[in-house]
Image (cartoon, rainbow, N blue to C red):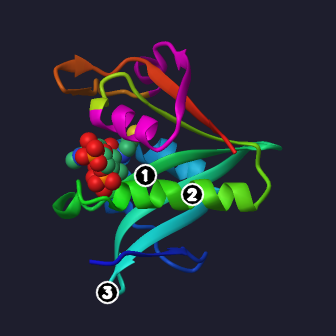
Amino acid sequence: MNMNIRTLTNDEKLPWDLLLLADPSRLIVQEYVKNAVIYVGEIEQKIIAICVVKETAKTIVEIMNIAVNQSIQGKGFGKQLIHFAVQEASKRGYAQIEIGTGNSSIPQLRMYQQCGFRIVGVDFDYFTRHYDEEISENGLICRDMIRLSYEL
Ligand code: COA
């Protein structure tokens, strides 16, 4: 199966099912998709993955959201999207690409580091402060945001 990656245009509907897989807060997603670049992965013209990238400083972009359709996770499409986002950020002249994830998101932490990201900090209690509902996964409560960065 080959995934083709392209930019979602302004007149297309946002794939909310995918966006909410990575981030349970519709309000928070609505805020960061404004002025962001949205890459979508397609297989046979069907959108199966998303990656939202946003400029957060003059030389820095951040992957705000990344998700792959549940039925085809674990097949390498997530990594392919991350490599694409890293290459695009580099082509556009950015110095750094960042990503943040929960302290409980163990497979994701593994994947980002496999893709070349390094842990650079912790935003303590980020999730407890910004999300109404408690998030828990992998036997852990999601409290802190682990910040990772890739020097381009
Ligand atoms: N299922 C299987 N493997 C996962 C995984 C998942 N849900 N999440 C991360 N991984 C890890 C695996 O350990 C794998 O490592 P390996 O190559 O050494 O076996 C690695 O990530 C690469 O996996 P890949 O197949 O490229 O990942 P993916 O296509 O499943 O995409 C996510 C990864 C995280 C985008 C995808 O699983 C997903 O959409 N999850 C739900 C949304 C989410 O958590 N988004 C990130 C929020 S921070």
Quadrant for the C terminus, please.
top right
Q: Residue furthest top?
A: 124
Three-letter residue code for mark 3:
Glu
Marks 2/1: CA distance?
10 Å
Q: Which of the two discs, 2 and 1, labels the residue nearer the N terminus?
A: 1
Label 2, secondary structure: give it: helix
Q: Which residue is mark 1?
A: 66
User: Where are the magenta residues, as a range?
Assistant: 107-130
Tell me the tag on residue 85. Answer: 2
Residue 129 painted magenta: yes
Label 1, secondary structure: give it: strand
Residue at position x 37%, y 64% from top?
49
- Find residue 131 and report its image quarter: top left
Residue at position x 57%, y 80% from top?
11
Tell me if residue 94 comes above or below residue 114 in the rendering: below
Three-letter residue code for mark 2:
Ala
Q: Residue furthest right?
A: 58
Quadrant for the N terminus, please.
bottom left
Residue at position x 30%, y 24% from top?
104
Tell me the tag on residue 44. Answer: 3
Question: For the residue with label 1, is its CB less than 8 Å from the closest atom of ligand 1?
Answer: yes
Question: For the residue with label 2, is its CB less than 8 Å from the closest atom of ligand 1?
Answer: no
Measured as percent of width and height from the top left, residue 126 is found at 48, 20
Measured as percent of width and height from the top left, residue 25 is found at 40, 41
Q: Does residue 23 appear in the picture of this structure?
A: no
- Find residue 111 and report its image quarter: top left
Q: Does residue 86 appear in the picture of this structure?
A: yes
For disc 3, the neighbor class at 10 Å (few under 14, some 14 to 19, many from 20) is few
Check if mark 2's residue and mark 1's residue have beta carbons within 8 Å: yes
Q: Which of the two discs, 2 and 3, labels the residue nearer the N terminus?
A: 3
